[in-house]
Image: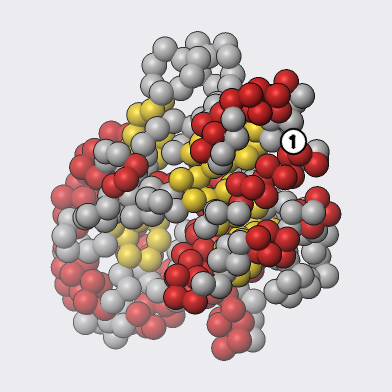
Amino acid sequence: MSESHGALAGLKVIDLTQMLAGPYCTMLLADQGADVIKIEPINGDPTRAFGPFRADDAEHHYGGYFQSTNRNKKSIAIDLKSEEGKKLFRRLARDADVVAENFRAGVMDRLGIGYETLAADNPKLVYAAIRGFGDPRTGASPYVDRPAFDVVAQAMGGAMGVTGPDAQTPMKIGPGVGDIFPAALTAFGIMAALRHAEKTGQGQFVDVAMYDGIVAMCERIIYQQSYTGRSPVPEGNQHPILCPFGTFTAADGQVTVGCPRDSFWKELTAIMGRPELGDDPKFATNNARLVHSAETIALVEGWTSARTKAEIALALDGKVPFGPVNTAEDIFADPHMAARQMLVDVEHPGSSKPVTIASTPVRMTLTPGGVQHRAPLTGENTSGVLEAAGLSKDEIADLRQRSIIA
């Protein structure tokens, strides 16, 4: 599959992002065929040092953290603190469609290469920023100068406040949703702004605050507070509005079962051998089951706990929403993953065997996109990118000799 098969083939993205939120955003664009040029410091993106590493990889160009979210990208290393480095960056941005960064507010402006400067050279430019608390251009947060990571966004945005075994034990969600969901929102914002630029010739500044993104992801808690006057709290693995809807013990692990509609409850009770519960006023409607939630959950768990995950799957398959609680090992073994080509092997420099990363879940019939190649080495594409920008081999060699590029 070639890169031209992606729907975003021909889109030029200058990527200044580091850590997880920004790289995940630009990865989404790269997976769909965009030409993403990752600009790194001379010594490389600091996240290259994050593991895990393969046991036989003595070179440590990067670990799994970097590999996963920087696939399909090119790398060019530039010293952006130098005047010549800034000129190079402006030259690259002059014909770019998108610039993305996730520095603290004001960093790019102090370097003299902020949005307004770049837009003066390239009025159609879409400039996207992901920050913990947004950019003053769209709303000056009192927290604008605070650094933020996933755990901060999860805590402040409400995700931790409704996750955990009970009201006294808030917990962070395992995956880095505080980064990844704002990243997906930013990719959406970029595409919306590009659509506007195509129609009008006018680019714009796209701003996503991680805090805002997690509040948007936790939208349920906002209307719950507004409608009831009470702040939702962690409720374990059940649901505050739907019942039954959560995890249940099986003989060999755990499964999830959900009955968001009363028809599913009737189907479930029939399968459980208790069809009378489907019409019992205590359980017939979702609101009634919520009132009697402890009893409802106990009834379902009494049935699931006496059966293995495979037996539950056989009984419920195609009739009631359910799924086993999978480990990574389970996911690797699931035939769904193979059928959907969701696990992809890529080369890892320094290791004798390929590594596996998660592919894109966005599937399109004519422009499939997907994982094309591994993450780049630091500055692996510097010469090619600069030659395409019009620099001669001698100019590139001189800049490299003076450590303006690598």
**Quarter of the image that includes the N terminus:** top left
Q: Position of residue 124 (x, y in %)?
A: 56, 66
Q: Position of residue 291 (x, y in %)?
A: 44, 80
Q: Position of residue 18 (x, y in %)?
A: 64, 43
Q: Total marks drawn?
A: 1
User: For residue 78, what is the image quadrant?
Assistant: top right
What element does badge 1 sit on?
loop
Taking depth in this image into account, of 324 and 199 the one nearest to the observer is: 199
The residue shown at (70%, 24%) is: 398
User: For residue 95, what is the image quadrant?
Assistant: bottom right
**Residue with the most extreme bottom position:** 227
Q: Is residue 176 visible?
A: no
> Is the residue 159 above or below the residue 400 in the image?
below
Q: Which residue matches tag 1?
A: 79
Q: Is residue 230 visible?
A: yes
Colouring rule applied to residues: secondary structure
The residue shown at (31%, 83%) is: 285
Q: In this rendering, would 380 be left or right of 243?
A: right
User: Mark 1: which amino acid?
Assistant: Asp
Taking depth in this image into account, of 164 and 86 the one nearest to the observer is: 86
User: For residue 284, what is the image quadrant?
Assistant: bottom left
> Is the residue 328 above or below the residue 237 in the image?
above
